[in-house]
Image (cartoon, helix red, strand yellow):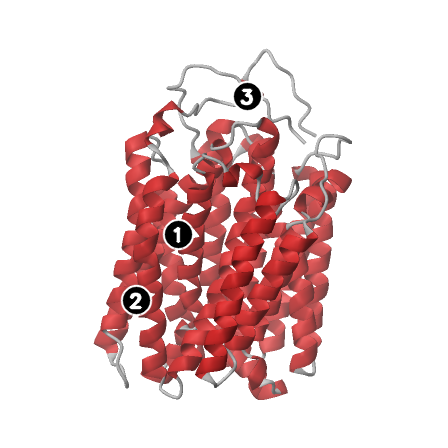
Amino acid sequence: MLPSTTCTPPTDAPAGTWRQLLSGRYLGTATVLAGGVALYATNVYLTTSLLPTAIDDIGGQQYYAWTATVFLIASVISSMLVTNVLAAGGPRGAYLIGLAIFALGTVVCAVSPTMELLLVGRTIQGSGGGLLAGLGYAVINAALPRHLWTRGAALVSAMWGVGTFAGPAIGGVFAQFGAWRWAFGVLVIATIAVAALVPGALPAHKPGSTTSSPVPVLSLALLTAAALLVSVAGILSNIAVTAAMVLAAVLLLVAFVAADRRSRHGVLPPSTFNASSLKWVYLTIVVLAVASTVETFIPLFGQRLAGMAPLAAGFLGAALALGWTLGEIPSASATAPRMVRRIVVSGPILVAIGLGIMAAFLTEHAGAGAIVAWVIGLLVAGVGIGIAWPHLAVGAMTSVTDPGEGARASAAINTVQLIANAFGAALAGVLVNIGEPSTLRSAQLLLVTFAAIAIVGIAVAVRALPRRLDKIDRSESALDRPDIVHDTR
C-alpha cells in the first residue's frame, strides 16, 4: 500500500480535479474502488425491487424484511474484518476475496428454490459486500494523494446513488418479465469484470504496511443482537411486544457504546470518544444513512398507493438516489471552510424538507400530480444526503491526530453507515408494520418519523465540522512531492 505520510506545503494548495482522478495513473484505482461499492449498493436495491416477484415464485412473504436485515448484519460484521484482510493480503488480495464471496452469494440467490435458501445467499452476499464497501473507503487515504481525497470520497459514495438508481431499474426490468433470477446473473457478470481489473489497478501486498487488530467480539455481538431485536420487532403484530423489543435494542446499543469505549480494539476508533469532532461526524452520517432507508419501501408504496407497475415503482424509488448523485458531484468541488460547514448543516435540513413534501402529498389512488410531488420530495431529500456526504467522509479522515488512527477512522465510515442502514431498515419495517393494514398510514408514519430524525440531525451536523476546520491542512500528499519516490505497485 502507499504510505500515508503527508507533507506541509502552503495551505492554499489547489484541490484536485475530476480529470486527475478519472484519467492517467489513478483511473484504474478509482474504477475498482467505485466498482466494489457500486456492486454492493446495486445489489441492495435490486433485491428490493424484484423481491415481490420472487416471493410470488418461491414464497416466504413472512421473511420480506429479513432479506435486508441478514444482508446488512453480515455486512456490518465483515466490515470489521477489513483491516485484518488488508493486513493479510494487501489491497489486491482483499478485493479478490471480497469479490469472490460476493459472487458466491449472488449465485446462491439466483438458484434459490426457497426463501430460506435465498436468505442464506443474502447472508453470504452481505459478507462479501461488507468487505467491498469497507475497502472502498479504507484504501482512499493510502492509494490517492490528499488533494484527491474529497473527489475520491465523492466518487465512492456516489456509487450508493448510482446503485440506488441502477438497482431498482435492473430489478424492475427483470421482475417485469418474471425473470428475477437473471438480475442476480447480471451482478455475477459485473463482479467478474471488476475482479479482472484488480491485479493491474491496486498495489501489491507489502508485509507490515497494514496492521491487523483483534476482532471486537463483544461489541459486534451487542450490535448484532440489537439489530436482530429490531428486525424481529418489525414482523410482530403485538404493539406492546414490539415496543419492548425496540426498547431492549436501545439498551443494547447503550451497552455497545460502553463496551466499545472501554475496548482497545473496538468497532470505532478511540478518537470517537474523546474531545474530537469525530463522533459528531459519525452521528451525522448515521442520520443521513437512516434517512436513506426510506427508499426500501418506496416501490411498495408506489405500487399500492398509485397502482404503478414494478418497473415504474422501481424508478420512483430511484428518485432519492438521483438527487443524491446530483447533489454530491458539484458539492465535492467546495473547499472554503465556511461553505463546507454550511453544506454539511444543509444536508439534514433538505432531507427533512424532502421527506415532509412527500408525506404531505400521500393519498390513496394517487394521480400524476401526487406522483410528481413524491418525486420532487425524494429528489430534495437525496440532494441533502449527497451534498454533505463527501465532506463528512473527509472530515472523519482529518479529525484524528494520530496518523495510525487515520485508516481506522476512514474504514469506520463504512461500518457506521452499515450499522445505520441496518437499524434504519429495521426501524422502517417496524413503522410500516404499525401502520398496517393501511398502506397510507404506514407511509405517513415512516416519512414523518424519518423527517423528524433528520431535524434532530441538524443539531448534530452543526458540531460535525467545527470552526477550526479552516486550520485543517488540506495539503497534498507526499505522493506529489517530486523529491520523494514511491513504489505504487
Q: Measure the alpha-carbon separation of dots 3 and 1.
A: 30 Å
Camera-nearest residue between 295 and 342: 342
Earlier along the polypeptide chain: callout 1 or callout 2?
A: 1
**What secondary structure is found at the residue carrying circle 3?**
loop
Compared to residue 248, the image places residue 262 above or below, namely above
* Rendering coords of residue 278 (x, y %): 46, 39
- Residue 6 disc label: 3
Residue drawn at x 46%, y 46% as measured from the top left: 282
Confirm or deny contact between disc 3 and disc 1 (CB under 8 A). no
Q: Quadrant of residue 437?
A: bottom left
- Residue 325 disc label: 1
* Rendering coords of residue 424 (x, y %): 46, 64
Compared to residue 393, the image places residue 175 above or below, namely below
Camera-nearest residue between 132 and 340: 340
Q: Is 252 left, or right, of 240 in this rendering?
A: right
For the C terminus, the image quarter is: top right
Q: Measure the alpha-carbon separation of dots 1 and 2.
A: 15 Å
Camera-nearest residue between 76 and 334: 76
Which numbered disc, 2 or 3, marks the residue closer to the eye? 3
Compared to residue 36, the image places residue 42 above or below, namely below
